[in-house]
Image (tube, grey):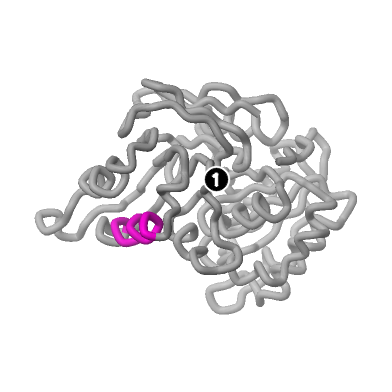
Amino acid sequence: MLRPRPLKIGDSIGLVGASSSTPSDKIELAIKALEMLGLNVIAGESCYASYGYLSGKDDLRAKDINSMFQNPSVAGVFCIRGGYGSARLLDLIDFEMIKSNPKLFIGYSDVTALHIAFNQICKLVTFHGPMPSTELYKGLDSYTMDSYLNNIFTDRPIGLIKAPEGMEIKTLVDGECEGIITGGNLSLITASIGTKYEIDTKGKILFIEEVDEEPYRVDRMLLQLKQAGKLDSAIGIILGYFTNCIAEEPEKSLTLMDIFKELIVPLSKPTIYSFPCGHDLPTVTIPLGAKVRIARGSSGVYFLD
Protein backbone atom coordinates (compact mmCIF):
# COMPACT_ATOMS: atom_id res chain seq x y z
CA MET A 1 0.00 0.00 0.00
CA LEU A 2 1.22 3.48 -0.90
CA ARG A 3 0.72 6.30 1.58
CA PRO A 4 0.45 9.59 -0.36
CA ARG A 5 2.72 12.55 0.29
CA PRO A 6 1.37 14.62 3.19
CA LEU A 7 0.20 18.14 2.52
CA LYS A 8 2.14 21.24 3.49
CA ILE A 9 1.03 24.80 4.11
CA GLY A 10 0.47 26.56 0.79
CA ASP A 11 -0.43 23.41 -1.16
CA SER A 12 -3.31 23.52 -3.62
CA ILE A 13 -6.04 20.96 -3.07
CA GLY A 14 -8.96 19.97 -5.27
CA LEU A 15 -12.44 20.13 -3.76
CA VAL A 16 -14.99 17.85 -5.44
CA GLY A 17 -18.61 16.84 -5.10
CA ALA A 18 -18.69 13.07 -5.41
CA SER A 19 -22.11 12.50 -3.91
CA SER A 20 -25.09 14.71 -3.04
CA SER A 21 -25.31 18.39 -3.92
CA THR A 22 -24.06 20.93 -1.40
CA PRO A 23 -26.38 23.68 -0.10
CA SER A 24 -25.26 26.93 -1.71
CA ASP A 25 -24.77 28.67 1.63
CA LYS A 26 -22.25 26.00 2.72
CA ILE A 27 -19.91 26.07 -0.30
CA GLU A 28 -17.96 29.24 0.46
CA LEU A 29 -17.91 28.36 4.16
CA ALA A 30 -16.37 25.00 3.26
CA ILE A 31 -13.73 26.66 1.08
CA LYS A 32 -12.87 29.17 3.81
CA ALA A 33 -12.49 26.37 6.35
CA LEU A 34 -9.83 24.73 4.17
CA GLU A 35 -8.14 28.04 3.50
CA MET A 36 -7.91 28.56 7.28
CA LEU A 37 -5.73 25.44 7.33
CA GLY A 38 -3.29 27.17 4.99
CA LEU A 39 -4.45 25.43 1.82
CA ASN A 40 -5.24 26.91 -1.58
CA VAL A 41 -8.58 25.54 -2.76
CA ILE A 42 -9.41 24.68 -6.36
CA ALA A 43 -13.14 23.98 -6.31
CA GLY A 44 -14.45 21.69 -9.03
CA GLU A 45 -17.61 22.42 -10.96
CA SER A 46 -19.27 19.55 -9.12
CA CYS A 47 -19.17 21.53 -5.87
CA TYR A 48 -21.65 24.00 -7.35
CA ALA A 49 -23.68 21.66 -9.56
CA SER A 50 -27.00 20.02 -8.80
CA TYR A 51 -28.77 17.21 -10.61
CA GLY A 52 -31.67 15.87 -8.58
CA TYR A 53 -30.10 14.53 -5.39
CA LEU A 54 -26.62 14.53 -6.95
CA SER A 55 -23.90 17.16 -7.20
CA GLY A 56 -24.09 17.11 -10.97
CA LYS A 57 -24.37 14.31 -13.49
CA ASP A 58 -22.09 11.30 -13.15
CA ASP A 59 -19.72 12.29 -15.96
CA LEU A 60 -19.20 15.75 -14.43
CA ARG A 61 -18.43 14.39 -10.97
CA ALA A 62 -16.10 11.71 -12.33
CA LYS A 63 -14.38 14.27 -14.57
CA ASP A 64 -13.69 16.47 -11.55
CA ILE A 65 -12.11 13.61 -9.61
CA ASN A 66 -10.04 12.42 -12.57
CA SER A 67 -8.83 15.91 -13.44
CA MET A 68 -7.88 16.74 -9.85
CA PHE A 69 -5.72 13.62 -9.62
CA GLN A 70 -4.20 14.31 -13.04
CA ASN A 71 -3.46 17.99 -12.33
CA PRO A 72 0.20 18.21 -11.20
CA SER A 73 -0.50 21.42 -9.24
CA VAL A 74 -3.06 19.66 -7.02
CA ALA A 75 -1.61 17.95 -3.94
CA GLY A 76 -4.77 16.39 -2.52
CA VAL A 77 -8.42 15.71 -3.31
CA PHE A 78 -11.10 16.50 -0.73
CA CYS A 79 -14.77 15.51 -0.95
CA ILE A 80 -16.97 18.42 0.05
CA ARG A 81 -19.70 16.19 1.52
CA GLY A 82 -21.30 12.74 1.43
CA GLY A 83 -24.93 11.78 0.86
CA TYR A 84 -25.40 9.49 -2.11
CA GLY A 85 -23.85 8.94 -5.52
CA SER A 86 -20.15 8.02 -5.34
CA ALA A 87 -20.73 4.40 -6.35
CA ARG A 88 -22.26 5.64 -9.61
CA LEU A 89 -18.83 6.99 -10.56
CA LEU A 90 -16.79 3.82 -10.26
CA ASP A 91 -17.05 2.78 -13.91
CA LEU A 92 -16.00 6.31 -14.94
CA ILE A 93 -12.91 6.67 -12.75
CA ASP A 94 -9.47 6.34 -14.38
CA PHE A 95 -7.89 4.07 -11.80
CA GLU A 96 -4.67 3.53 -13.76
CA MET A 97 -4.12 7.29 -13.96
CA ILE A 98 -4.81 7.67 -10.25
CA LYS A 99 -2.43 4.83 -9.47
CA SER A 100 0.25 6.76 -11.39
CA ASN A 101 -0.63 10.03 -9.62
CA PRO A 102 -1.19 9.08 -5.98
CA LYS A 103 -2.51 11.91 -3.85
CA LEU A 104 -4.12 12.42 -0.48
CA PHE A 105 -7.85 11.66 -0.75
CA ILE A 106 -10.27 12.31 2.12
CA GLY A 107 -13.96 12.00 2.92
CA TYR A 108 -16.30 9.52 4.59
CA SER A 109 -19.86 8.18 4.60
CA ASP A 110 -20.96 7.75 0.96
CA VAL A 111 -17.31 8.26 -0.04
CA THR A 112 -16.74 4.72 1.29
CA ALA A 113 -17.36 3.37 -2.24
CA LEU A 114 -14.38 5.38 -3.53
CA HIS A 115 -12.19 4.46 -0.55
CA ILE A 116 -12.69 0.75 -1.17
CA ALA A 117 -11.95 1.09 -4.89
CA PHE A 118 -8.87 3.30 -4.43
CA ASN A 119 -7.51 1.01 -1.70
CA GLN A 120 -8.00 -2.19 -3.68
CA ILE A 121 -7.39 -1.12 -7.29
CA CYS A 122 -4.86 1.69 -6.86
CA LYS A 123 -3.23 0.30 -3.68
CA LEU A 124 -3.56 3.82 -2.29
CA VAL A 125 -4.02 4.67 1.38
CA THR A 126 -6.98 7.05 1.68
CA PHE A 127 -8.39 8.97 4.62
CA HIS A 128 -11.74 8.50 6.34
CA GLY A 129 -12.24 11.91 7.92
CA PRO A 130 -14.39 15.03 8.36
CA MET A 131 -15.59 16.94 5.30
CA PRO A 132 -15.60 20.69 4.66
CA SER A 133 -19.33 21.37 4.27
CA THR A 134 -20.51 19.03 7.03
CA GLU A 135 -17.99 19.43 9.87
CA LEU A 136 -15.00 21.64 9.07
CA TYR A 137 -16.92 24.83 8.40
CA LYS A 138 -18.48 24.70 11.88
CA GLY A 139 -15.13 24.24 13.61
CA LEU A 140 -13.80 21.05 15.15
CA ASP A 141 -13.09 20.07 18.73
CA SER A 142 -9.41 19.65 19.59
CA TYR A 143 -9.50 15.83 19.56
CA THR A 144 -10.98 15.74 16.05
CA MET A 145 -8.78 18.52 14.69
CA ASP A 146 -5.57 17.03 16.08
CA SER A 147 -6.34 13.68 14.45
CA TYR A 148 -7.28 15.36 11.17
CA LEU A 149 -4.13 17.50 10.98
CA ASN A 150 -1.85 14.66 12.09
CA ASN A 151 -3.09 12.60 9.15
CA ILE A 152 -3.12 15.14 6.33
CA PHE A 153 0.02 17.12 7.23
CA THR A 154 2.32 14.29 8.34
CA ASP A 155 3.12 10.75 7.26
CA ARG A 156 4.35 9.57 10.63
CA PRO A 157 2.62 6.50 12.09
CA ILE A 158 -0.23 7.66 14.33
CA GLY A 159 0.44 5.05 16.99
CA LEU A 160 -2.11 4.35 19.70
CA ILE A 161 -5.58 5.84 19.30
CA LYS A 162 -7.15 6.49 22.66
CA ALA A 163 -10.75 7.43 23.37
CA PRO A 164 -11.64 11.09 23.90
CA GLU A 165 -12.01 12.24 27.49
CA GLY A 166 -15.19 10.86 29.01
CA MET A 167 -15.48 8.03 26.47
CA GLU A 168 -14.24 4.45 26.44
CA ILE A 169 -13.28 2.07 23.66
CA LYS A 170 -14.67 -1.32 24.67
CA THR A 171 -13.92 -4.95 23.88
CA LEU A 172 -16.61 -7.18 22.40
CA VAL A 173 -14.33 -10.14 21.65
CA ASP A 174 -10.90 -10.10 23.28
CA GLY A 175 -7.90 -11.02 21.19
CA GLU A 176 -5.00 -9.69 19.17
CA CYS A 177 -4.54 -9.24 15.42
CA GLU A 178 -2.59 -7.10 12.97
CA GLY A 179 -3.42 -6.22 9.39
CA ILE A 180 -4.56 -3.63 6.89
CA ILE A 181 -7.69 -1.71 7.85
CA THR A 182 -10.54 -1.48 5.34
CA GLY A 183 -14.20 -0.49 5.41
CA GLY A 184 -16.23 2.57 6.30
CA ASN A 185 -19.99 3.02 6.15
CA LEU A 186 -21.94 -0.23 6.55
CA SER A 187 -24.56 0.60 3.89
CA LEU A 188 -21.88 1.25 1.27
CA ILE A 189 -19.83 -1.78 2.24
CA THR A 190 -22.91 -3.97 1.88
CA ALA A 191 -23.86 -2.37 -1.44
CA SER A 192 -20.50 -3.40 -2.88
CA ILE A 193 -21.27 -7.10 -2.46
CA GLY A 194 -21.78 -8.82 -5.81
CA THR A 195 -20.14 -6.04 -7.83
CA LYS A 196 -16.65 -5.95 -9.34
CA TYR A 197 -15.83 -3.38 -6.65
CA GLU A 198 -16.76 -5.76 -3.82
CA ILE A 199 -14.86 -5.20 -0.61
CA ASP A 200 -12.05 -7.66 0.09
CA THR A 201 -11.76 -8.37 3.80
CA LYS A 202 -9.49 -11.43 3.61
CA GLY A 203 -6.78 -11.09 6.22
CA LYS A 204 -7.83 -7.51 6.98
CA ILE A 205 -9.30 -5.62 9.91
CA LEU A 206 -12.81 -4.44 9.03
CA PHE A 207 -13.97 -1.03 10.26
CA ILE A 208 -17.73 -0.36 10.27
CA GLU A 209 -19.82 2.69 11.16
CA GLU A 210 -23.41 3.70 10.39
CA VAL A 211 -25.99 6.45 10.82
CA ASP A 212 -29.79 6.74 10.85
CA GLU A 213 -30.54 3.03 10.38
CA GLU A 214 -32.91 1.15 12.64
CA PRO A 215 -31.45 -1.92 14.38
CA TYR A 216 -33.26 -4.38 12.07
CA ARG A 217 -31.56 -2.75 9.09
CA VAL A 218 -28.17 -2.98 10.77
CA ASP A 219 -29.03 -6.64 11.45
CA ARG A 220 -29.88 -7.20 7.78
CA MET A 221 -26.67 -5.61 6.51
CA LEU A 222 -24.39 -7.37 8.98
CA LEU A 223 -26.14 -10.64 8.16
CA GLN A 224 -25.45 -10.08 4.47
CA LEU A 225 -21.77 -9.46 5.21
CA LYS A 226 -21.69 -12.59 7.33
CA GLN A 227 -23.43 -14.76 4.74
CA ALA A 228 -21.14 -13.37 2.02
CA GLY A 229 -18.15 -14.51 4.08
CA LYS A 230 -16.89 -10.97 4.67
CA LEU A 231 -16.96 -11.13 8.46
CA ASP A 232 -15.44 -14.60 8.56
CA SER A 233 -12.55 -13.69 6.23
CA ALA A 234 -11.63 -10.61 8.28
CA ILE A 235 -9.11 -11.12 11.07
CA GLY A 236 -10.61 -8.48 13.32
CA ILE A 237 -13.47 -5.98 13.51
CA ILE A 238 -13.66 -2.38 14.70
CA LEU A 239 -17.15 -0.99 15.33
CA GLY A 240 -17.31 2.79 15.27
CA TYR A 241 -20.24 5.10 15.88
CA PHE A 242 -23.72 3.83 15.08
CA THR A 243 -25.26 7.28 15.28
CA ASN A 244 -29.02 7.51 15.72
CA CYS A 245 -29.39 3.80 14.97
CA ILE A 246 -32.37 3.45 17.26
CA ALA A 247 -35.71 1.72 16.89
CA GLU A 248 -38.96 3.63 16.55
CA GLU A 249 -40.49 1.06 18.89
CA PRO A 250 -37.66 -0.06 21.21
CA GLU A 251 -39.88 -2.52 23.06
CA LYS A 252 -40.32 -4.47 19.81
CA SER A 253 -36.69 -4.36 18.72
CA LEU A 254 -33.41 -6.07 19.38
CA THR A 255 -30.68 -3.73 20.56
CA LEU A 256 -27.50 -3.19 18.59
CA MET A 257 -25.63 -5.11 21.26
CA ASP A 258 -28.05 -8.03 20.85
CA ILE A 259 -27.24 -8.02 17.13
CA PHE A 260 -23.48 -7.77 17.66
CA LYS A 261 -23.55 -10.64 20.16
CA GLU A 262 -25.55 -12.87 17.82
CA LEU A 263 -23.80 -12.12 14.52
CA ILE A 264 -20.24 -11.14 15.47
CA VAL A 265 -19.30 -12.73 18.80
CA PRO A 266 -19.68 -16.35 17.54
CA LEU A 267 -16.99 -15.64 14.92
CA SER A 268 -14.40 -15.33 17.72
CA LYS A 269 -12.62 -12.49 15.91
CA PRO A 270 -10.91 -9.79 17.99
CA THR A 271 -13.57 -7.05 18.03
CA ILE A 272 -13.79 -3.66 19.68
CA TYR A 273 -16.73 -1.26 19.76
CA SER A 274 -17.44 2.35 20.64
CA PHE A 275 -14.40 3.31 18.56
CA PRO A 276 -14.65 7.11 18.09
CA CYS A 277 -15.11 7.35 14.35
CA GLY A 278 -18.10 7.91 12.09
CA HIS A 279 -21.10 10.23 11.90
CA ASP A 280 -20.47 11.99 15.18
CA LEU A 281 -17.94 14.13 17.00
CA PRO A 282 -15.34 13.83 18.34
CA THR A 283 -13.94 11.56 15.64
CA VAL A 284 -10.57 10.25 14.56
CA THR A 285 -9.35 10.35 10.98
CA ILE A 286 -8.48 6.84 9.77
CA PRO A 287 -5.87 6.09 7.09
CA LEU A 288 -7.71 3.28 5.30
CA GLY A 289 -5.22 0.81 3.86
CA ALA A 290 -2.71 1.36 6.68
CA LYS A 291 -1.53 -1.45 8.93
CA VAL A 292 -3.16 -1.50 12.36
CA ARG A 293 -3.11 -3.71 15.43
CA ILE A 294 -5.85 -4.58 17.88
CA ALA A 295 -4.06 -5.59 21.06
CA ARG A 296 -5.40 -8.06 23.58
CA GLY A 297 -7.28 -6.22 26.30
CA SER A 298 -6.53 -3.00 24.45
CA SER A 299 -8.21 0.30 25.21
CA GLY A 300 -7.38 1.50 21.71
CA VAL A 301 -6.02 0.65 18.29
CA TYR A 302 -2.42 1.00 17.12
CA PHE A 303 -1.83 2.49 13.66
CA LEU A 304 1.55 1.16 12.61
CA ASP A 305 2.20 2.92 9.29
234 and 261: which is toward the camera: 234
229 and 47: which is toward the camera: 229
Q: Residue at x 37, y 61 (%)?
A: 224
250 and 24: which is toward the camera: 250
Q: Quadrant of residue 80?
A: bottom right
The location of residue 101, given as percent across then percent down, is 83, 51
Q: Is residue 224 magenta?
A: yes
Q: Which residue is mark 1?
A: 182
Residue extent of the magenta highlight: 218-227
* Residue extending farthest right: 72
Q: Residue at x 68, y 43 (%)?
A: 125
- Does 231 sit left or right of 259 as displayed? right
Image quarter of the C terminus: top right
Q: Residue at x 69, y 48 (%)?
A: 105
The location of residue 96, given as percent across then percent down, is 80, 59
18 and 90: which is toward the camera: 90
The answer to whether residue 138 is visible is no
Main secondary structure type of the part rendered in magenta: helix
Looking at the picture, does residue 37 appear above or below residue 77? Answer: above
At label 1, the amino acid type is: Thr
Looking at the picture, does residue 9 appear above or below residue 60? Answer: above
